[in-house]
Image: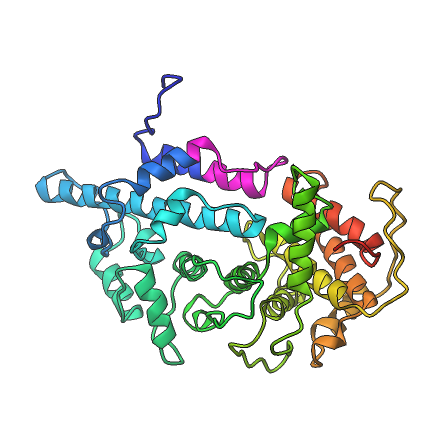
């Protein structure tokens, strides 16, 4: 390929490789990029502006025929290629949403444009994963039997979930579920205000019932109700991952934003169980609820990791939300003052029976004040750090290493004055 050529590779396998490399570099590389790569953005833009990627009518149960070539089979192959591009476009939309929401980045222009259109609802996984030896009729009949309602667009599926009775008539697969969550969060909700929007809890009734999808749902709702970039900047002492804020004014603005968000006292208080959501429930309390749900899922001994690329980061964000809320509402007047960020790091406190202490915090049935103490917050931070340290070899993943660096500081100095 010519060096200055902007033309996309012709083979679908090459486009899929660009996507997979991008996903790996974001979540698993040693030096995660600040922004999505130029190759990814070019591919995303070409797919978003393609003639057939947004056509709803091609999203039908069909597979490419690999038998002898004739006119009808050629048409089927063209249709199959269109569904491949369509599915890759939706995957790009989902990856950009995850990158922007989890790390406090601005979404790409392509995603903003697509959010104002009718994105096609993807085919179910059994049809997509079918092999040439499978019987088409049997697969389609089985799919229609499982999915009594066929949706053309993601918005139609999301709206349909809100009106579906319980138990639901059908369950969406993992890819469909993640797209519905991303679509539900596409409109920015002002986290600084007492907002009149409920989290779309009804989605949990129609999405795949698995730990990974539950984690994905709760972290989506957590980021929806949290000023993520500001929280990362404050906890990272002016660093957002490996990105340094360009001025002290931006750092001060982040401190003010986190203080305003975490210190909210109007609206309903958080209640661990049972949870009755209300339009008057403030954003930080909803973020606290979802943070606790994430940590509860990962505290289950049967759930080591769910397989999501952002498992570790979800745990980290959950612990930061609890730390910020506890710090903002702490009544401890004896906290030492943070004299300088460059002082030597004090030794980490060691707490025996950490899992038992964490369980007592997570599964308490008391109100919000039951765990709002420096000691409880220290348990959460130490447990999270210990959990991430067990994931894999040290210095192997930039995202996890960045989280561990921040957690190390918060474990030692997270109760000191002057964070925000």
Q: Quarter of the image for the N terminus: give it.
A: top left
Percent x, y for residue 278? 53, 79
Residue 326 showing in the rendered view: yes
Quarter-wise, where is residue 373 in the image?
Answer: bottom right
In the displayed structure, would residue 165 be above or below residue 234?
below
Look at 62% across and 35% down and name the residue there. 31
Q: Verify whether residue 173 appears in magenta.
A: no
Q: Which residues are magenta?
A: 20-40
Q: Is residue 20 above or below residue 166?
A: above
Confirm whether the magenta stretch covers residue 39.
Answer: yes
Q: Residue at x 49, y 69 (%)?
A: 199
Residue 154 point in image, percent of width and height: 33, 60
Residue 386 shown left or right of residue 138 in the figure: right
Residue 190 rendering spot, x and y as whole percentages: 52, 61
Q: Quadrant of residue 44?
A: top left
Q: Position of residue 196 (x, y in %)?
A: 49, 73
């Amino acid at each position: 390929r010519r060096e200055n050529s902007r033309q996309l590779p012709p083979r679908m396998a090459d486009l899929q490789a660009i996507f997979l490399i991008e996903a790996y570099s974001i979540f698993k590389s040693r030096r995660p990029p600040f922004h999505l790569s130029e190759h990814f953005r070019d591919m995303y833009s070409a797919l978003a502006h393609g003639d057939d990627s947004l056509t709803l009518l091609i999203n039908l149960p069909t597979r490419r025929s690999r038998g002898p070539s004739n006119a009808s089979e050629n048409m089927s192959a063209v249709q199959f290629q269109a569904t491949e591009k369509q599915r890759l476009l939706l995957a790009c939309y989902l990856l950009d949403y995850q990158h922007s929401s989890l790390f406090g980045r601005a979404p790409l222009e392509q995603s903003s444009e697509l959010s104002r259109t009718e994105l096609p609802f993807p085919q179910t996984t059994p049809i997509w994963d079918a092999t040439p030896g499978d019987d088409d009729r049997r697969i389609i009949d089985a799919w229609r039997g499982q999915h009594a309602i066929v949706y053309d667009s993601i918005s139609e599926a999301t709206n349909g979930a809100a009106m579906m009775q319980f138990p639901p008539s059908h369950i969406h697969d993992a890819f469909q579920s993640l797209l519905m969550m991303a679509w539900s969060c596409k409109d920015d909700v002002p986290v600084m205000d007492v907002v009149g929007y409920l989290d779309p809890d009804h989605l949990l009734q129609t999405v795949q019932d698995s730990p990974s999808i539950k984690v994905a749902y709760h972290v989506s709702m957590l980021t929806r109700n949290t000023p993520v970039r500001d929280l990362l900047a404050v906890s990272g002492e002016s660093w957002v991952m490996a990105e340094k804020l360009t001025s002290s004014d931006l750092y001060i603005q982040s401190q003010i934003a986190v203080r305003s968000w975490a210190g909210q006292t109007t609206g309903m208080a958080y209640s661990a169980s049972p949870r009755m959501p209300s339009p008057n429930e403030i954003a930080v309390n909803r973020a606290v609820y979802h943070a606790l749900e994430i940590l509860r899922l990962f505290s289950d001994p049967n759930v080591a990791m769910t397989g999501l690329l952002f498992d570790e980061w979800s745990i980290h964000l959950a612990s930061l939300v609890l730390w910020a809320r506890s710090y903002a509402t702490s009544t401890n007047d004896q906290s030492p003052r943070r004299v300088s960020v460059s002082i030597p790091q004090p030794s980490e406190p060691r707490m025996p029976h950490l899992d038992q202490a964490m369980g007592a915090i997570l599964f308490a049935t008391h109100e919000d004040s039951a765990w709002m103490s420096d000691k409880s917050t220290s348990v959460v931070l130490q447990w999270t750090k210990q959990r991430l340290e067990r994931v894999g070899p040290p210095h192997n993943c930039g995202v996890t290493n960045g989280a561990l660096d921040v957690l190390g500081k918060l474990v030692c100095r997270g109760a000191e004055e002057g964070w925000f």
